[in-house]
Image (cartoon, rainbow, N blue to C red):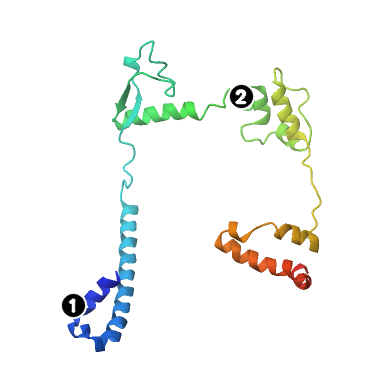
Amino acid sequence: MEDLAEAIILDRSLSLAHDNTAHILAEKAAKQLQQLISREKMRKMYRKIGRTFQKNPGGGLSCIDVPDASAVSLNSGNPSDPKTLKGPWGSVTNPHEIAKVVCRINTTQYHQAHATPFGSGPLAELIGHKGDTVTSADLLRGRLPNPFPPELLPETIRILQSLASPTPTTDISPAMTEEEFVQTYWVPHENTSSPPQVDILVIIRQPVETPTLFPFILR
């Protein structure tokens, strides 16, 4: 782009091609370069605005491939399980048919957990799909359902027990001793860190390598 800016200036004033006017040419070319960069930014902005206001900027799905159920044989597998299907596939291009197929696939995909204890059944009704029932609140307070819903698996009961268990907490002091500071920041190495991290390590290692600076960094 620098060459283009200089060519534009020379096209306007060919007399600037002489050596004794090289500094004037460089100054005008620098200004012209800034104008070119600004114009390019404006063009990109208007192109982005144009794409945003288009009625159908992405185009959407125009074709999807689905298992061809009419050509499925005993050796081709189950058309309802595309991962293992070895039979032929067909293409759907009609927009309404595409919408039906996508809705059917999404219904199956997003309901995989429906048959689990928290997805349907007595326990799911106690917990609620939003987790805003009395049983949910009791679990958070450490109280298990009494009695448990029938036919719960041991794994499900362990999950409930874990939910009802209090979260362990530890007291963390904001103070740091000189020994803890050295142990924490002496581990990283500059040769295995990115450039911004190297700058930080250099600043931190100054007090680590110079103990007289500890009172200023730890106070």
Give the residue type at disc 1.
Asp
Q: For residue 187, which quarter of the picture?
A: bottom right
Whether 71 is drawn above or below 123: the answer is above
Question: Which amino acid type corresponds to the residue marked 2 in the rendered image?
Answer: Thr
On screen, residue 29 versus residue 205, left or right, reads left
At 24% from the left and 86% from the top, the residue drawn is 19
Residue 35 lies left or right of residue 105; in this view the side is: left
Image quadrant in which the N terminus is located: bottom left
Q: Position of residue 168 (x, y in %)?
A: 79, 42
Secondary structure at badge 1 equals: helix
Residue 147, placed above or below residue 17: above
Please state which of the two labelled residues, at mark 2 or mark 1, is closer to the viewer. 1
Q: Pointer 1: what residue?
A: 11
Q: Secondary structure at mark 2?
A: loop
Count of marks overlaid on the render: 2
Task: Check if mark 2's residue and mark 1's residue have beta carbons within 8 Å.
Answer: no
Disc 2 target residue: 116
In this view, which residue lies farthest toward the bottom? 20
Q: Is residue 200 left or right of residue 79?
A: right
- The residue sitting at 26% across, 72% down in the picture is 3
Write down the quadrant of residue 18 in the picture: bottom left
